Image: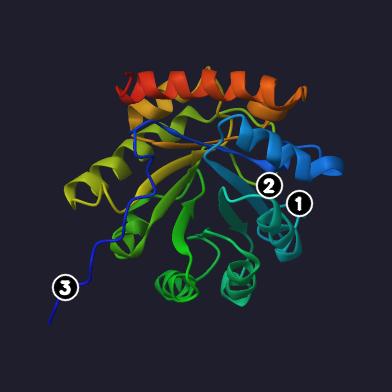
Amino acid sequence: MTAPAARPTLARTDGQPILAPSILSADFARLGQEVTDVVAAGADWIHVDVMDGRFVPNITIGPLVVRALRKITQATLDVHLMIVEPERYVAEFCQAGADVVTIHAEATPHVHRALQQIKACGARAGVSLNPSTHESCLEYVLDDCDLVLVMSVNPGFGGQSFLREVLPKVAAIRRMIDARGLQDQVALEIDGGISTSTAREAAAAGARAFVAGNAVFSGGGGSKAYAQRIADIRTEAALGAGVMT
């Protein structure tokens, strides 16, 4: 029996940190332009926070917005489902154009099944962990993941302060990924309070993809302002990861 080919990494080809601006902090009245501007400014992915008012105390957007964004950008759409029973909606988000669909380990008793469902729909599959969730829950599904997303705030709202208490967990997951030889398969992403003052230590702990909302979009300014903010965060992350060129 032939072993399945390894899936290519989600990492940048130059080894630099991935920046994924979260549209939760964008101006929704001009969302299409905001996405166009941050992609032109150097964003690698567009992070789409989907909230249902049940798993988290907020309601945001659904597949229709993902479908609209897919029409205007070729950037990776990184869709983060902060919803209960994500299996009910995975197919819709994949059909809408999501490139990566991430579910929460806390939101379903069938994490493995949900990951297989995402991949069967043609998208990359991710698992997210809340700040108080132990990394041991990944033991039996890590080989099926394309991405692990560590929340460095309690999910539900933008603009929260970074929880440094999660850094040992990021480091533990990095060790788990490396020990299994999955560096070229599993991306390690962090979300919550990421800015120029926190990206370096998050990267030093092992994160390689960084979701940034307010740190990119706050104050607006268009592609030129966004480019400077993205570059500044990437520089700090690169310093932490030891990949400065």
Left/right placement of residue 31 relative to residue 146 reads right
Residue at x-position 44% and y-position 42%:
189
Whole-percent x, y for residue 207 in the image: 39, 36
Question: Whole-Å distance between the Cαs marked 1 and 2?
Answer: 6 Å
Whole-percent x, y for residue 109 in the image: 48, 72
Q: Residues within 10 Å of mark 1 (few under 14, many from 20)?
A: some
Count numbered badges in the picture. 3
Q: Amino acid at mark 3?
A: Ala
Q: Is residue 97 above or below residue 48?
A: below
**Quadrant in the picture for the N terminus:** bottom left
Q: Which residue is mark 3?
A: 3
**Quadrant in the picture for the C terminus:** top left
Whole-percent x, y for residue 126 in the image: 45, 58
Left/right placement of residue 116 relative to residue 58 reads left
Q: Amino acid at mark 2?
A: Gly
Looking at marks 2 and 3 on the same chain, the residue that comes earlier in the sequence is marked by: 3
Pointer 1 with pointer 3, Cβ within 8 A: no
* Quarter of image, res 53: bottom right
- Mark in the foreground, 2 or 3: 3
Which label sits on residue 58? 1
Looking at marks 1 and 3 on the same chain, the residue that comes earlier in the sequence is marked by: 3
Q: Amino acid at mark 1?
A: Asn
**Residue lying furthest left:** 1
Residue at x-position 33% and y-position 26%:
241
Q: Is residue 201 above or below residue 37?
A: above
Secondary structure under badge 3? loop
Residue 53 seen by the camera: no
The residue closer to the viewer here, 154 or 102, is: 102
The residue closer to the viewer here, 243 or 165, is: 243
Q: Is residue 95 above or below residue 73?
A: below
Q: Which residue is mark 2?
A: 156
Pointer 1 with pointer 2, Cβ within 8 A: yes
